Amino acid sequence: MSRIGKMPVEIPAGVTVTLNGAQIKVKGPKGELEMSAHPNMSVAQEDKQVVVSRPNDQKSNRALHGMTRSLIQNMVIGVTEGYKKTLQLVGVGYKADMKGKTLVLTVGFSHPVLFVAAEGVAVSVLPKENKIVIEGLDKQAVGEAAVRIRKVRPPEPYKGKGIKYEGEIIQRKAGKAAGA
C-alpha cells in the first residue's frame, strides 16, 4: 500500500467535496477547485473524509494512488488557506512594478520584462522590500507562476544577483584569484 495514498483526506468544516464519477469538486471559503481523477483510481467520500483506493498493485497504479490523494489534499488546503510564494529581487536597480494586472520587471536588461499571471493567480509587489508575492488557490498554478518569474533572471553564483525565492540560499563561488 502507498503510505500517502492509504491516508484519508480530512474535510474541514466549511468545505464541501462533490464526487461525480471521476470529477472531484472542492468548494470552500476562498473559492472552488475542480479536477478529474485517473479512471483507475476510485474516490469515495466517507463521513468527513475522502478515501482514494486502487484496483491492484501495478506500478503505475501505485504511483497514481499517492498522487491522486495528494492532489485532493492540496485542493482542500487551497480552498481553506490558499497558497503563497514570495520572490525576492537582489541587485542594484532591480525592481518590480504592477501596471494593472501585468508585472513589469526591470532586472538589468535593456528592456523591461512583462509578465501576465494565469487566471486564478494574484501577483502583488512590495516595492520597499523588493519582493513579489504570488497567491492563489491552486498549488500548481502558484508554483508555476513563481518559476516563470524566477526564470527571467535566475540568481547567479558570483554576486547573488537575480530573482530568488524568499529564504533560498544561493551557493556562492569565489571570483578570479589574482595571479602573481
Image (cartoon, rainbow, N blue to C red):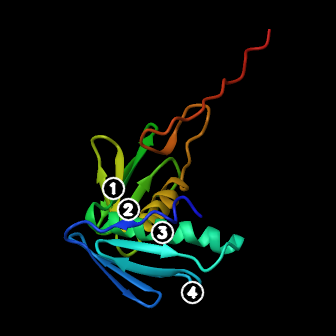
Label 4 sits on residue? 39
- Residue 103 is marked as 2
Give the mark toward the camera: 1 or 3.
3
- Crowding at dot 4, Cα within 10 Å, few <14 / some 14-19 / many 20+, comes out as few
Tell me where residue 8 appears, x and y as whole percent.
Answer: 41, 66
Q: Earlier in the sequence, mark 2 or mark 3?
A: 3
The residue under label 4 is which amino acid type? Pro
The residue under label 3 is which amino acid type? Arg
What is the spatial separation of the Cα atoms under label 2 and label 3, in whole angstroms? Answer: 34 Å
Q: Is residue 104 left or right of residue 161?
A: left
What is the spatial separation of the Cα atoms under label 2 and label 4, in whole angstroms? Answer: 39 Å
Give the mark toward the camera: 4 or 1.
4
Given contact means CB atoms under 8 Å apart, are the residues at marks 2 and 1 in contact?
yes
Give the mark toward the camera: 2 or 3.
3
Tell me where residue 168 appears, x and y as whole percent.
Answer: 49, 39
As helix, strand or loop, the secondary structure at mark 1 comes to: strand
Q: Earlier in the sequence, mark 1 or mark 3?
A: 3
Q: Nearer the viewer, residue 108 or 32?
A: 32
Residue 22 visible in the displayed image: yes
Tell me where residue 71 appears, x and y as whole percent.
Answer: 46, 69
Q: Name the residue at the right extreme.
A: 180
As helix, strand or loop, the secondary structure at mark 3 comes to: helix
Label 3 sits on residue? 69
Tell me where residue 83 appears, x and y as whole percent.
Answer: 35, 59
As helix, strand or loop, the secondary structure at mark 2 comes to: strand
What is the spatial separation of the Cα atoms under label 4 and label 1, in whole angstroms? Answer: 44 Å
Q: Is residue 78 left or right of residue 15?
A: right
Label 1 sits on residue? 97
Q: Earlier in the sequence, mark 4 or mark 1?
A: 4
What is the spatial separation of the Cα atoms under label 1 and label 3, in whole angstroms? Answer: 38 Å
Q: Name the residue at the bottom extreme.
A: 21
